[in-house]
Amino acid sequence: MTTTGPRVQGLTLDRDAEKPTATGPWVSRIHLDRDAEKTTGPRIFRVHLDQPDDSRWWRMLSDAERERASQLASPTDKHRFTIAHAALRAILGRLCGVRASRLTILTEAGGRPYLALPDGRPPLDFNLSHSGEWALVAVTPGSRVGVDIELIRPDLDCLEMAKRMYQPAEVDRLHHTDPAARHTEYFALWSAKEAYVKAIGIGLAGLRDVLVNREADAPHGTVLSRTHPGALWPVRWLDAAPGYSAALVTGPDRRQPPRSCGI
């Protein structure tokens, strides 16, 4: 296993790594379209959360993030939260050329986080998701982005949950899905829905109104909300980790928050 990848505030970017490096947490890239990544395409980073403790990661967090972590009852949840948010700050800090601990992350009216940059710097949108032992960070310059990763739970009554949370066409789709693949399909739809509501910033309360269109097991699809009409947003499913479902949604830049110079 190599540890020669570029450093990100103490995290190693090693696209081939499959285990934590000896030097601390690492972040690997999930490559989509390399030509698009060179221009305005999203960059996706994968973070393994079950990594050795290091006081540096705690110091990278903001006071608000430390407070949120401290409120978690499980030591494992607290550790994973710390790694996920430290990795997020490390990635954004590297891309912006700013020390991770000095980044200012604010929230929109609906609670969606955004990076506050000084005037003159190009906007950089980002999104973080974590589930189980994995996290994903999506970053894009100039468009809205949402990402979600979900641990597939085979014990979940997915048909019953779908009746409560999904659109009729999606419930019908699940009914006609091979039972052996039903949970995978259920979480594929869920990850797309959650990535979408995170991208547009309406919160999980709007998830019931979201419709995902996907042909068979295609890696691409579209998504939209009945209560927030507009253009179809593209969704792409990601091969993030075995036993997990993940999706990425990108769309036009609808954010116009005030930017502050606090970094």
Image (spheres, rainbow, N blue to C red):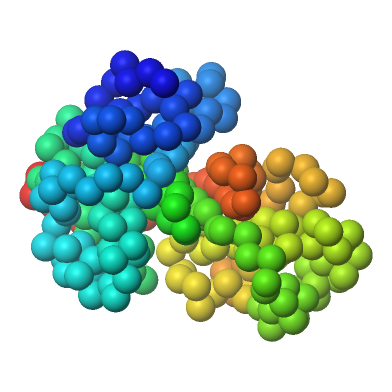
- Taking the image as drawn, is residue 199 in sight? no
Give the mark count.
0
Image side of residue 256 versus residue 184, left or right: left
Residue drawn 63% across the image and 74% down it: 209
Where the N terminus falls, by quadrant? top left
On screen, residue 68 above or below 41: below
Q: Which is more toward the observer, 201 or 56? A: 56
On screen, residue 61 above or below 39: below
Q: Quadrant of residue 164?
A: bottom right
User: What x and y, as percent, mark residue 110?
Assistant: 36, 71
Q: Quadrant of residue 142?
A: top left
User: What x and y, as percent, mark residue 83?
Assistant: 29, 50
Residue drawn 20% across the image and 62% down it: 65
Image side of residue 199 versus residue 228, left or right: left
Q: Which is more toward the observer, 219 or 242? A: 242
Q: Quadrant of residue 77?
A: bottom left
Residue drawn 82% across the image and 66% down it: 174
User: What x and y, as percent, mark residue 241?
Assistant: 57, 43
Image side of residue 260 versus residue 22, left or right: left
Residue drawn 37% across the image and 49% down it: 50
User: What x and y, as percent, mark residue 239?
Assistant: 61, 40
Where the C terminus falls, by quadrant? top left
- Taking the image as drawn, is residue 220 in sight? yes
